[in-house]
Image (spheres, grey):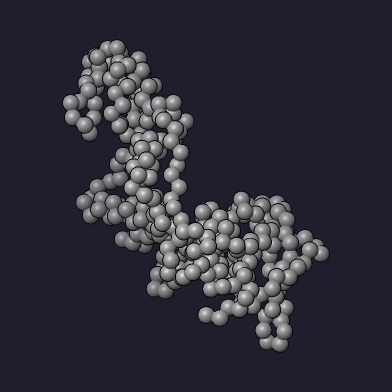
């Protein structure tokens, strides 16, 4: 693909596709500039991808927006842009970019990539659309059409794991419907750090996966940049798990109970048993539990 020597990539929405396009163009030998009308803090693209793009020599013009082109004959030779500043919040809650009068500038451009928006192809599924919005679903993933559930990018653009979660939610709802069961609401609440005893855990820094050196990654389009973890790193990273909301056999409830109301199992992986006839409700077990597994009613 002949892109010339200067490529400009325009971001309006999420930015992940734009970052991908920019990094590919860099590997094709072009000087690459990304144009984004907001700040780095408001950029939805994955931080790691943005950092890698900058490390690879891709320039990002923040608070800048395209306003036109400059041509020589039939060919575009430059992108005309204008500096922006953040004004009052818009409908999304983010501060609206406002052009700064007299701040126009140009960026050399032999090719321009417009990564401004994405939307699913709703052909054949128009009945699921409500007004100008995409497919709307309830808490179980059900649409307004009886017997139809939805998830993934047709309800919101997001990452693969979000779509997988939507799929599981819908599958469970469909299973309950076929068996004539009601949703029982038996979902464990998300355990946050402010409800845990963090001083129980050893502080272990997050492992950083290896990556191909900058001077090597441009040699071929087929090179894998992110090399992943070593076996030792994986084991070290797994030890950082805090078992939020799930018993991990720390024994603290058993050790601190003065009323012998807790039976310690002899086998790993078996939950501790509570002898309610001995419990005086002192709450020590719940207060000392590092991972907030024990709840007092």
Residue at the extreme right: 102
Up-down: is 157 above or below 88? below
Asked whether 283 or 240 is in front, the reply is 240
Residue at the extreme bottom: 73
Quarter residue 262 falls in: top left
Quarter residue 161 falls in: bottom left
- Residue name at image x 56 percent, y 69 percent: 26
Q: Residue 136's x, y, as percent? A: 44, 58
- Regarding residue 94, the answer to whether it shows in the image is yes
The answer to whether residue 241 is left or right of residue 28 is left
Q: Residue 194's x, y, as percent? A: 47, 30
Up-down: is 122 above or below 174? below
- Regarding residue 141, the answer to whether it shows in the image is no
- Count of numbered badges drawn on the protein: 0
Asked whether 148 or 100 is in front, the reply is 100
- Residue name at image x 40 percent, y 26 percent: 200
- Residue name at image x 23 percent, y 55 percent: 178
Q: Residue 254's x, y, as percent? A: 28, 20
Up-down: is 108 above or below 42? below
Asked whether 82 or 29 is in front, the reply is 29
């Amino acid at each position: 693909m002949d892109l010339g020597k200067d490529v400009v990539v325009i971001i309006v929405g999420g930015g992940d596709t734009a970052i991908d396009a920019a990094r590919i163009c860099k590997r094709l030998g072009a000087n690459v500039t990304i144009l984004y009308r907001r700040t780095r803090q408001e950029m939805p693209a994955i931080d790691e991808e943005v950092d890698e793009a900058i490390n690879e020599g891709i320039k990002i013009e923040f608070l800048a927006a395209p306003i036109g082109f400059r041509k020589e004959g039939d060919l575009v030779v430059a992108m005309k842009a204008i500096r922006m500043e953040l004004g009052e919040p818009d409908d999304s809650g983010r501060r609206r970019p406002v052009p700064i009068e007299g701040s126009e500038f140009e960026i050399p451009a032999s090719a321009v990539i417009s990564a401004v928006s994405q939307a699913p192809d709703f052909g054949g599924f128009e009945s699921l659309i409500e007004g100008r919005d995409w497919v709307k679903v309830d808490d179980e993933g059900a649409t307004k059409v009886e017997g139809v559930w939805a998830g993934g990018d047709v309800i919101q653009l997001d990452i693969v794991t979000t779509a997988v979660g939507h799929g599981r939610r819908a599958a469970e709802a469909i299973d309950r419907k076929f068996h004539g069961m009601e949703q029982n609401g038996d979902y464990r609440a998300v355990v946050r750090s402010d409800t845990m005893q963090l001083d129980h855990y050893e502080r272990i820094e997050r492992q950083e996966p290896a990556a191909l050196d900058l001077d090597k990654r441009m040699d071929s389009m087929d090179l894998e940049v992110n090399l992943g973890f070593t076996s030792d790193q994986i084991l070290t990273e797994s030890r950082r798990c805090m078992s939020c909301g799930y018993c991990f056999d720390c024994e603290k409830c058993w050790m601190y109970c003065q009323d012998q109301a807790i039976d310690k199992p002899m086998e790993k992986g078996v939950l501790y048993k509570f002898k309610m006839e001995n419990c005086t409700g002192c709450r020590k077990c719940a207060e000392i539990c590092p991972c907030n597994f024990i709840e007092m009613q």
